[in-house]
Amino acid sequence: MKKRGVTYKLFIMTVVFFLCFYGMVILSQMLFFEGFYENQKISRVENHLKTYAVNYASEENRSMSQISKDTAKFIIQNKSQLAILTLEGKVKLGDPFHITLKKENGQLVTINLSLFMNMYGTELKNAQIQQGDQLTIFGENDIVEDSQIHVLYPINIYKQGGPVVGEPSAKVITGEDEFGETETITGTVTEIVLPDLKTWNPRQVLMLSAMEEWFPLTQTLLEKLKKLEVQQADWTEPWTGVRSSVLLYPVKMKNGDIDLLFTVTSLQEVSETNQALQWFYVYLGIGGFILILFLSLFFSKIVTRPLISINNAAKRMVNLDFTDHEPIRQNDELGSLSSSMHTLSRKLDSALGELQEANQQLVSDMKEKQKMEIAQQEFFANASHELKTPISIIKGFAEGLQDGVSAGKQDHYIGVIIEESDKMEMLVQDMLNLATLQSDTLKLRKTTYMLSELVEDVMGKLVYLLKQKNLEAVIIPSNELPLYGDLRWMEQVVSNLVTNAIRHAVEGSTITISIKGLEESSIFSIENTGEQIPEHQLEQIWERFFRAEPSRSRQTGGTGLGLAIVKRILDLHGCRYVAENTGMGVRIVITFDH
């Protein structure tokens, strides 16, 4: 069975989740959206109407102007039509949007505007009618019973100095009676209530049609309203088929009368919107499915990329590969996990490196220990060999003196014993010097000195040895610079090198000592004329008790520790040194860094 990666699984799960969620949204919209929206709209209208009714019934002596403004506000907010009637169907306020004109004789005329604005709303708004303007209006006449206020439904409105709004202006001028009971009036605007055209809902005709169908009220409905029971019912306008919700809200006034708030809220737009949404979701679903695929793939990549990176890092750690890797830059649990693994990897890599170094050091220490053991064995063997001969000589000559040699030989025997004792003392001193130099507690006391002066001092002490072999020493300084080191031990170096050169030089030859100063270093070299050292032994001359002679002859003198002491002192000073054969003998070169 093929193994599925976490990216594939997460992609499939994300697609299924989005499709289920999207399907639930579409199914809910198709089955429940329309009813839910209608209930919400009707409930909102009913709650606002309740607030309106409380204000309407509680305030006494309210002007019709104030009631009209409250009614207009209700209509605009709820996109519903509202009229105030008696239980018998007599209209107390049918149109809140109006203009009130005051004629020259003081009579007030109310100009209802809802029907007029359905056809000429924009033109009326552009006319910018305000209080105090002179208007001439031609329209159908109506008189509200028990009132001195006349109601006029305008056909044409003319503002002095402005354009005519409505039918052709000839009707205003001539006053032709082509519309039945019409009248042309002129007056001054005392009040104007207009809606905002952006929120205007031209449903006044629907309100009039509903009032004609519902009134007079049935006896059953009338009895319920008298008990102040709110009535709500769905109603379909017979001519247009527009669905609406009719709400009858009875309000008991302080004088005992019952006024009826009659509202009509269109539900047709809900049905139309729902039908459009169904087709919209069909088209949206096609594009949405493609978008879901891309989003799911992108989402799964984002989530799984750090997981894959962490998994790869864990695999490398399993194989003991702790090479450094960049942690994931995320401020979440995955970022914290990656940072922790990054820290763990670095620490394990450091611990593994330290362990490997420790193992290497342990191997090196073991090898060094073995070399030291071998060196110790060789040292004791060499030391015993070097001490055995003088001890045997001293013992032999001492026994001779004890046996009573002739008086002429006693001085010779005593001289040999003293000479061999000096050699033993020299060997012991060299061994002590070498032990001191190899001690970790040794501290160099460095100071500034001139190498040529040091060489001259040493040569002055060894002039006797030079005369014994008829040798000549030549010192050649060039651009000499001061050096910085422990003067005591550097004197030991020069002394050992010069003594060694004298021992192995041919009688009557010259020992050449050169000192050359460079920009960053100084070069010291000492060269004699004599037997050369085999090439394979040039590196071994710095070892303890090493002699180039296979027979380890003591005729050339020395303890075999001189160059080993030189090597240790130069190492402590950080100098570089080398021994090399020349055409006539051997040369030792030392480089001092400034």
Image (cartoon, rainbow, N blue to C red):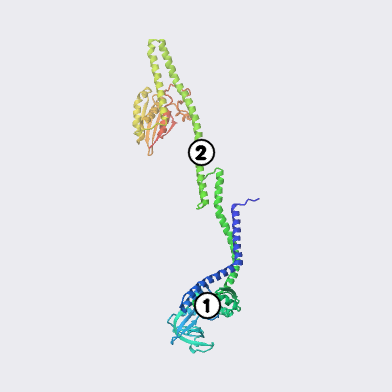
Q: Relative to the observer, which residue lies in front, 567 or 518?
A: 567
Q: Secondary structure at mark 2?
A: helix
Outermost residue on the front side: it is: 256
Residue type, label 1:
Asp
Label 1: which secondary element: strand
Give the x, y percent position of residue 298. Answer: 56, 57
Q: Nearer the viewer, residue 17 or 101?
A: 101
- Could you say which is closer to the camera, residue 154 or residue 44? 44
Horizontal arrangement in the rendering, residue 296 relative to residue 191 (left or right): right
Residue 56 percent across, percent down from the top left: 49, 75
Residue 238 x, y percent position in the rendering: 61, 78
Where 266 falls versus 421 (above or below)? below
Numbered mark located on residue 543 in the image:
none
Crowding around mark 1 (Cα neighbors within 10 Å: few <14, some 14 to 19, many 20+) is many
Distance of mark 1 from mark 2, alpha carbons? 99 Å
Q: Which label belongs to residue 259?
A: 1
Q: Residue furthest right?
A: 1
Tell me which residue sits at (39%, 12%) in the image.
409
Does residue 473 show up?
yes
60 versus 434 height, above or below: below
Q: Quadrant of residue 410?
A: top left
Q: Is residue 506 visible?
A: no
> Which amino acid type is shown beneath numbered disc 2?
Leu
Disc nearest the viewer among 1 and 2? 1
CA neighbours of label 2 inside 10 A, class few (<14), some (14 to 19), many (20+): few
Q: Is residue 353 above or below residue 186?
A: above
Residue 95, relative to residue 430: is it above or below?
below
* Figure label count: 2
Q: Which mark is residue 355?
A: 2
Residue 166 point in image, percent of width and height: 50, 83
Please state if 418 lies on the left or on the right of 86 as rendered: left
Position of 358 with respect to 217 (left or right) is left
